[in-house]
Amino acid sequence: MKLRHTLLALLALTGGANAASIGISFGADNAGGGDPTLEPDDSAGVVSSTNWNNANGVASTITDAVDGTGAATSLDVTWASDESWSYNTTIATSDAELMSGWISMNTTDKDGTVDISSIPYALYDLYIYSGHDRVDTTTRFTETNGAFAEFTIIEDVTGGASPNTLEANPFVYNDAAGGAGNYVRIPNLTADTLNIVFDNPNSDRAGFAGIQFVEVPEPTSALLLGLSGMALMMRRRR
């Protein structure tokens, strides 16, 4: 019985370790209204994290992006698009702020690009967020080097038909893997460079709200962390 309790405690400790994360929020320069800028202590994302990097403008570069602790990393991101815009709405939560700004393509059959280099994680999950103030905007994402397959997000902010649902509290993330939504998770990537092309395969407008890299710890590291925590717990009980 004691062994069972010990194993359960170990699993809880290893599963509860905070994952390292780097987040980039596009369209943070407030062209359309509202206030999409994330402050350092604003926690946002499907894997909630602070210290998001605010990406301003239709085309620019962020060098040595900071992670969720505020520490500089090696990651660089360069983007090019037609438009940087945001919802003209009152923002209720940090998650809504993340989704309320975006870069987009305004011309049919024209691509936007987001190029990421020097990703510091050996293994990571990638989260791509898509938002726009046009209902049911479709954005197609392709990684040109084959790190992930082409996919589309039919943007549907919180499952409702109105951009004003951004004001809902709490904000709702909908996984677009099964249809309409506002983000997609791509697990277990290893590439240290990503070259992402995005467009709307049906018409103009294609919204790209943000991208997040969440480290997947090595099993041995997680196990050692759990064993250390378990040893500390046992020491305290003596």
Image: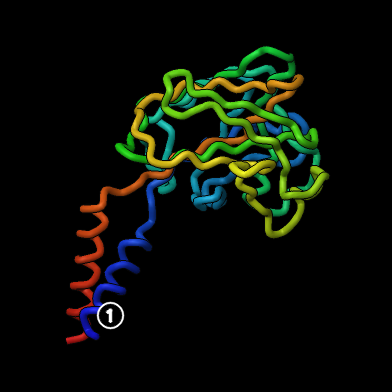
Tell me residue 96's x, y (percent): 68, 48
SS under mark 1: helix
Label 1 CA crowd tier, 10 Å (few <14, some 14–19, many 20+): few
Does 33 appear above or below 21?
A: above
Residue at 30% over, 74% down? 9
Tell me residue 84's x, y (percent): 68, 25
Residue at 30% over, 37% down? 122
> Which quarter of the rendered picture does the C terminus lie within?
bottom left
Does 176 appear above or below 203?
A: below
Does 94 appear above or below 156?
A: below
Asked whether residue 53 is in view, the answer is no
Residue at 79% over, 49% down? 160
Asked whether residue 120 is in view, the answer is yes
Residue identifier under label 1: 5
The colour mode here is rainbow
Q: Nearer the viewer, residue 57 or 199?
A: 199
Q: How many marks?
A: 1
Q: Nearer the viewer, residue 46 or 154?
A: 154
Left or right placement of residue 168 versus residue 129 in this view:
right
> Which quarter of the rendered picture does the N terminus lie within?
bottom left
Tell me residue 215's x, y (percent): 37, 44
Residue at 76% over, 20% down? 203
Q: At label 1, which amino acid type do we have?
A: His
Tell me residue 143's x, y (percent): 49, 23
Does 113 appear above or below 212?
A: above
Q: Nearer the viewer, residue 87 or 111?
A: 111
Which quadrant of the view contains residue 89? top right
